[in-house]
Amino acid sequence: ISSGRSECWLVVCKSCCHQLWMHRIYFQSSQKLFIQTTRNISSTKYIKIQQKMRTSISTTTFSHAFLLIGGAQSFATPFHRRGDIIARANYADRSSSTSSLSVLKDLANEEKTNGSVGTTTLDDTTSSETKPTGETTVLATDSQFIKSLPEKRSYRVIELPNKLTVLLASDPTTDVEAASVHVRAGHFDDPADRAGLAHFHEHMLFLGTEKYPKEEEYEEFLGKFGGMSNAYTDMEDTNYYFNVSPLEHSEDEDEEGSTVGGTALTGALDRFAQFFIAPLFDESMLERELRAVNSEYLNGKTADNWRNFQMLKHCTSHDHPFSKFGCGNYNTLTNGGDENLKEESDDDNNVELFGGGSSPREDLIKFWTEKYHAGNLRLCVVGRASLDELQTTVERTFGPVRSPPANFVANGIVDQIKAGVFTIPIEGEKHLRDGNDDFVFQTEHSTYSPNVAFGPDQLGLIREVVPLVESRSLKIFSTVPPSADPVLRDSQPFRVLSHLVGHESPGSLHHLLNEEGWINSLASGTGIATSDFELTNIAITLTPKGMRERDQVLAKTWQWFALIKDAVMNDPHGLVEQYHKELKVITDTSFKYREMGDPTDFCSAAAERLFDYEPQKILLGGSEVGDYDVEVAQAFLERLTPENSLVVITGPELGEEKSEESVVSARDASWETEERYGGKYRQIRVSDTLAEEWNHPTEIDPRLRLPGLNQFIPEDLSLRCDDPEHEADFNPDFDYRKEHPKLLVDTPKLRMWHKMDRTFRVPKTSIRLQLTTPDIYRSPRSITLNRIFQNVLSDDLNSYVYDASVAGCNYRVTCVPSAYHVSVSGYSEKLPHLLDVVTSRIASLIEEMKQGDEAHPVLADIFQKSKENLLRQTKNYIFESPYETGSYNIRMLLETPVWHINDYTAEMEGPDAEAEPLTMKECAEVAEQCLFGRSKAVSLCIGNIDEKGSQEVADVISNHFLNKRPLIDDEIPTFRSLIMPNKAEALKIFGSPTEASEVSIVTEAVAHSESEENNAVELFIQTASSYELGYEGLAIQEVIGSMAYNSAFNQLRTKEQLGYIVSAFVKKSTGGGNAFCVLVQSSNTLPPAIEERCLRWVEQFRQEMEDMPEERFAMEAASVKASLLEKDIKLSEEISSLWGEILVTVAHSEHFKNPVFDRVDKFASYLTLDGDKEDDDENEMKASTSSIKTAADLKKRVLEFYDHYFMSPDRRAVSSRVYNRKAKDLFDQNVGKPGVISSYADARKLKQHLSSFPTAPYW
């Protein structure tokens, strides 16, 4: 993904082009991209797009490398900033263990012998039975909040008597209730002898509290209500959050006898609050959680982003906490312990305590005592209840949290200004300057003074890095003051400067470097943000040609800086001020129409913002932009110098032993290795001559010029639903989300649906188009050429539509195996023009490419660059994690037709590619055939657009793309899922018993990376096609998947410690196949042993379900149902839901061509049991033939389903094993054995014996 210009993207698998919707991609003002995902596959809190695609026949297959399963990093993603929403990992059910000791009791014991602990004595703490005296204070009422127009929640900020600040949000219509606690403490606070303690502490909080000592209590409770929990540890912050669905389980009562089932949020908050009141830190759980953190660390050792992040930290001043190793591992957390160390003993269980190191428990307690009090926490809660009811619940549950020490001031700008640490500039007064007349930023170097992370010794350097996978980049980091500084947060000069540096229009740095064929992308923003410094970052991904010409790339970059500086310094109220005003208008409009977000994400982000924004501005946040301040802009820009920067160059060529001609080189320095992740680097100081050349370039390339003003900023923001002809039809009592799109155009060539938005009331429209053709996936060469064309088009269109993207209008053209997708979305006024520009340029670009290299040398360079990039991305796939490789190998065995990754590579390099090279002319001809040849089109126009506007869109589509006769149904490409053999069928195929005694087929591979320490196994047990399972069978399968994850995680990860990544989930494959999968990635166990443990767990889980009460099955069904029926809360969610239903009809014959827009509702109705609250519509939807009426029926059917598909001797089981490099001998020993698939040639041979599932839809 090259830029964050939407909130819902179609992501295409880089190895096979299959598609997957990734939901909630956030784009912050810093022009950085972060992906929010949920990895608790078994919990029923699925991402909405995944919910609906999980239960449909679609082109999506969930075996791709996009699925974040159990074990995603809980240590915060590198290269991010405070306030951004980043990927997090949640904590699932763990094995039961209790302890009679809480932290406070330990503190009492230590108090008797040692006096005080850290800086907080027992007298400063409050026991879990005692509330601070005083009354709750209201800091902001709902009427004081600055809100967007679509905002419907009611808000209140309060301060409890214990000084805990809380944001309450009441939303009576929400289907998800959530809460988050943000702690202003992270790995910067780790003690010197316990690197990673904050991260480890985050893990340990989930393992039981004094009030709820069962370690699985919290997750079990959330699971009953379709909930999940996540957490992440950052540099100066730790964030915990959860969500639940407000289901009714009347049998659940709390210890005092009052019903908590009526409000799931109350019970969840009570359990959550105990993290911050009386956690156990049970000694018996330390060892296994230490190993879990160590496994998490090992997972990151083969990832370049983690290596580069730690390298950046390693090379800073070791006096500053930024230099700390935040993830931690077994050795650092035990202060020298070795996880492999055992005593010499006959008893295999006699393990040297903490590997010869020491227990971290005392340090955990000290950390919690010092950092986890009310003054250093912020809480946000979203619920259905009224604000008064939410306040009462919070007072009861979080009231016992300890008050802060006297005179405590949190490390947040709000408290610091209130305490007089910093001052807000008064309008009209001069800015602060020091004795040298240098501008003073109050927050800069204030938190950890006198220590500075990046001083003169760490800046003015050129650093060269050798990556693990083939990648080339050039980054310039410059130290600047924190963006939260009182002087900066008003005018925000970094916004306009980042906007200009990263601009992509003609005349920009990006455009020049791109035309030269030197870069693939250029982005500008904040790379690292802390409370006392930030690093701005211009990140350029280089082509091989760009790597060779990096001297020129850097020279042009510093020339571009000089051009911007000149405009800021010498034209104080000119063009740059106009850019600032433009961005202010865009930001104001964006906030004005900002829709309500997912409650969980909102809570997580808002809890953090409570530290840094006034209560009434929590929703506004960074969207408040003041007037342009030229003095501040000049002072900020003065920091962008070579002497104040770090230049980092990354590329595989740098490690080769050969002479270099580049001036920008560290070749005279020795190679060094970073100790934690093993990153290889060398560095040298920028010479005075080079610094002067960059600082004051003697000439600026005449092709560089600042951009013009943006012509795509919308002015007409009126709503079509308010037009007189539509307003009269409006029914305020009707939920228009239930209104289905209208089939507006129905011809053999095009079927178009239309829906005018009346629900979300934002002036935005989305136009989706799919052009289905069998020509894209006809051969590896065809899809390779189409993928190259997609990249060329994207590269080319940037110069045409970059301003549109900045102004909030987005486009995307994507090639997938069966079709081209064209999407334009954004503010309605400018969308028709954008659609015309995109569609017209597709045609003209093809014509130019057909004219050949000599006629269009710039296009030829772009084509060559796109081909090189695709080759690099394809080859890098072999460096993916072992579990991703295992999933890929199953897909290669399961699906047909499918091309292997080697087929793509052979089209781009090697003897065949040299004999018959891919050419730009051929690329254009193939793309032309797929885009403008015979096809069948479906389209959706939705949002702020009426039928007349939609008909005009249909005309544009028809005129541009549909000038040939349409495809007939039999020509539409069909992808099938093969039926895996059972043991008897495998014996017939191979002629002798298979090597594995309990599975029919074993696929094996070896990790490519020499440094890969992990093995992986995916146990794949096939069930049946969706058609054969039907609504009822699929519903049963979902219930099993929902229950299985926690059990597998608890047994395989927590108890047996097989590895950090453990998951059990339902998998759907292209062509209607279904399966149940158990996945483990382990650094300490070989694949055959992992496989055996997975098989034993499958048996164990059957007994667990047998022992479960019937009510548990009813709860699981209600959880899955509630998750499926979550209402769309944003227009983008509704668009994705409806478009997904339209797409799944394309591959079917005319008998199934009408989308079933209420399919998910019908699916959910099969999970409605007698006695459940259900409306008449659900009763009508549920087929009379359903055998599931009661909880007893459901349990019976679940066990029958499980026995038939998972326990039977005829089960269809495949094990996909991936060995690390050290275990390659084991792989070699199995090559050629019956039932072992060791290559794709073996897979092709097996597939000739297999039949496929029916592709008919289940609805």
Image: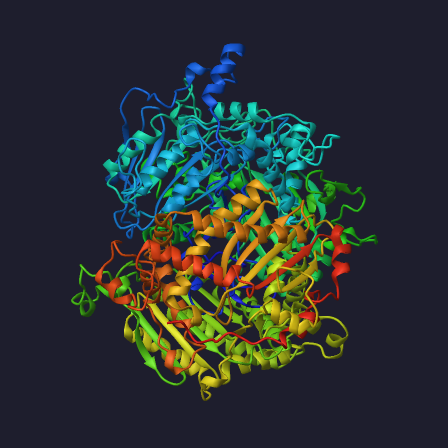
Residue at the extreme bottom: 965
Tally of numbered discs = 0
Give above or below for 433 relative to 819.
Answer: above
Q: How is the image coloured?
A: rainbow
Q: Quadrant of the C terminus?
A: bottom left
Q: Please indicate, yes or no, whether residue 28 appears anywhere in the rendered image.
A: no
Q: Residue at x 49, y 13 (%)?
A: 111
Q: Indicate the quadrant where residue 356 lies.
A: top right
Quick check: 681 above or below 1139?
Answer: above
Say which of 182 and 1206 sits in front.
Answer: 1206
Taking 986 as reference, is 841 left or right?
left
- Where's residue 579, x and y in %? 44, 52
Q: Nearer the viewer, residue 960 or 908?
A: 908
Q: Which quadrant is home to the N terminus?
A: bottom right
Q: Quadrant of residue 24?
A: bottom left
Q: Is residue 311 left or right of residue 272?
A: right
- At 39% from the left and 35% from the top, the residue drawn is 271
Front residue (pair 294, 16): 294
- The picture places residue 1034, in percent across and down from the top left corner, at 41, 64
- List x then y, in percent, for residue 424: 40, 30
| Image position, residue 831 (x, y; %) | 38, 67
What residue is shown at x 33% (from left), y 22% (from top)?
Answer: 131
Residue 640 falls left or right of residue 157: right
85 sits left or right of 928 in the view: left
Residue lying furthest left in this view?
728
Q: Is residue 1226 visible?
A: yes
